[in-house]
Image: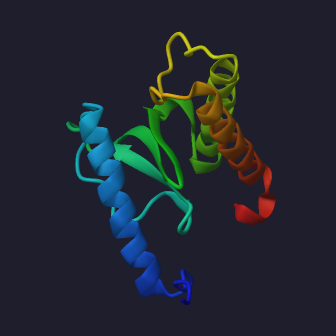
């Protein structure tokens, strides 16, 4: 079976639509007030990760950063990162912190990315994804 060619604009656009729907559904479940998401993420590596600027419900200006893909969906306030590169780094740092708690068999006191049945296994996965995000945030060729 051949893999989709994500360099093809039509394939990439289809992936953006799927990611957009998934992050929108996630934000709705989390009760995050927002407007309709833009057509394309602020940054992505298809089909692995999409980083979205989430507009606020009143002004339409960015209110949150949200991340989705082959990793846990998550969000935080837009003002914590000035651009996509900084947001990617912030998600990586956040997940590193949370994974350390999970690997110790505990929940982080304020950040609840998931309620896994096996916190250590999820902590290992989260640590790996955090490391990847941090590596991408540092890679000047991606920006």
> Which residue appears farthest toward the left when viewing the image?
58
Task: Name the residue: 71% across, 63% down.
Answer: 142
The quarter in which the C terminus is drawn is: bottom right
Numbered-mark total: 0
Q: As rendered, which of 138 and 71 lies closer to the eye?
A: 71
Task: Name the residue: 58% across, 41% down.
Answer: 87
- Asked which quadrant contains residue 14, the reply is bottom left
Does 5 appear above or below 112? below
Q: Position of residue 109 (x, y in %)?
A: 53, 10
Is residue 89 visible in the rendered image? The answer is no
Q: Position of residue 130 (x, y in %)?
A: 68, 40
Does 58 appear above or below 14? above
- Asked which quadrant contains residue 104, the reply is top right
Task: Name the residue: 63% across, 34% down.
Answer: 121
Task: Name the residue: 50% across, 13% down.
Answer: 110
Is residue 2 visible in the rendered image? The answer is yes
Q: As rendered, which of 22 and 141 lies closer to the eye?
A: 22
């Amino acid at each position: 079976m051949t893999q989709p060619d994500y360099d093809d604009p039509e394939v990439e656009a289809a992936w953006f639509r799927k990611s957009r729907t998934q992050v929108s559904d996630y934000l709705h479940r989390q009760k995050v007030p927002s407007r309709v998401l833009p057509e394309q993420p602020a940054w992505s590596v298809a089909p692995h990760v999409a980083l979205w600027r989430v507009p606020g419900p009143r002004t339409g200006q960015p209110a949150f950063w949200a991340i989705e893909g082959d990793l846990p969906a998550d969000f935080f306030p837009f003002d914590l990162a000035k651009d996509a590169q900084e947001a990617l780094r912030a998600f990586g740092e956040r997940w590193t912190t949370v994974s350390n708690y999970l690997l110790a068999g505990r929940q982080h006191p304020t950040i609840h990315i998931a309620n896994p049945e096996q916190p250590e296994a999820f902590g290992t996965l989260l640590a790996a994804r955090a490391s990847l995000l941090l590596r991408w945030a540092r890679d000047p060729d991606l920006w």
